[in-house]
Amino acid sequence: MGNEGIYFLAQFKVVEVMSKSQGIVEITFEEERELLNLPPKPELPKYSSQLINLANQFAQGTRPRVVGQMSELIKEFRESGGRTFEDWEQWYLQRYPHAIDEATQKIWNMLGNFKEALGQLKKEDVRKWVEDLVLIKTYEGLMIQEAILKKVAKELSGNYRFATPEEESKGIDGVIIIDNQEIPVSIKPKTYVTQERHLPEDLRGYLIVYEKKKNKIIVDYSDLLSSLKGKG
């Protein structure tokens, strides 16, 4: 091995030692299972895990009414003195003896619905879906933001403008202008707000929430209004 190779290995060792000395350590998910003496992760066919998860979302197989409120149950289990996975498994199944079977059946039934739908699906259907997403919903989403900006600005006797690309990168969708003061806003559907997994952005603007009804759009700009009253 040449001097460069030896130097690289030396650097690697230094970094490794420094990381350990700073109290930083990594635990892989596989190692976590080993540390907790858990069974290995189930081996499933490719894409199966994602499909099962999606089916579960539709079937609601693991909702509290089926399997119990897990955060409360695990707390109760710990308070009862349970520690090991075997303790937990026995403790849970004694209280919910049919929950696993019921959840499994709900998800399996939904997977059957998926299979039936896939059997009826054609390539043209996929194209229509893509066109609806890329063309129609993109345009509709942009226009609904403009409509909401216009409406809220009118309600506040102000004006508006669209966000710049830099502002969009910060989660800002538009700006309300009142007495030459620019107020950034983020315009999101109610479903976006209520589902935490759809909130990865660090929203920098005041939140305006809308909900589509049968023949109208309900717009909630109370977050912005409260801020304006506070400044007033």
Image (cartoon, rainbow, N blue to C red):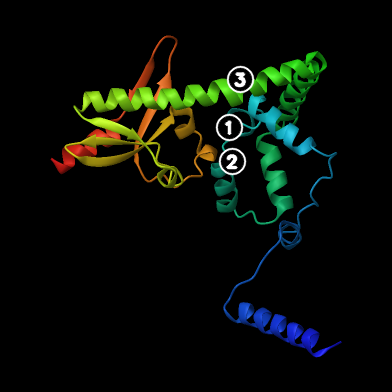
**Label 2 crowding class (10 Å Cα cut-off): few <14, some 14-19, many 20+?**
few
**Among the two numbered marks 2 and 1 on one chain, the one whose residue lies closer to the N terminus:** 1
Q: Which residue is mark 1?
A: 64
Image location of residue 131, percent across then percent down:
64, 21
Looking at this view, is 138 or 203 the one in front? 138
Q: How far is mark 2 from mark 1, CA to CA?
A: 7 Å
Element carrying mark 1: helix
| Residue type at tag 3 | Asp
Residue labelled with disc 3? 132
The amino acid marked with disc number 1 is Pro
Q: Given contact means CB atoms under 8 Å apart, are the residues at marks 2 and 1 in contact?
A: yes
Which residue corresponds to mark 2? 70
Residue 70 position by quadrant: top right
User: Residue drawn 46% across and 46% down?
Assistant: 169
Precedes in sequence: disc 3 or disc 2: 2
Vertical placement of residue 7 versus 46, above or below:
below
Task: Name which residue lies at 72% across and 45% down.
Answer: 90
Q: Few, some or many C-alpha atoms within 10 Å of disc 1 (few <14, some 14-19, many ≥20)? A: few
Identify which residue, 222 or 83, lies in the foreground: 222
Q: Residue at x 17, y 41 (%)?
A: 230
- The C terminus is located in which quarter? top left
Q: Left of 29 or right of it: where is 189?
A: left
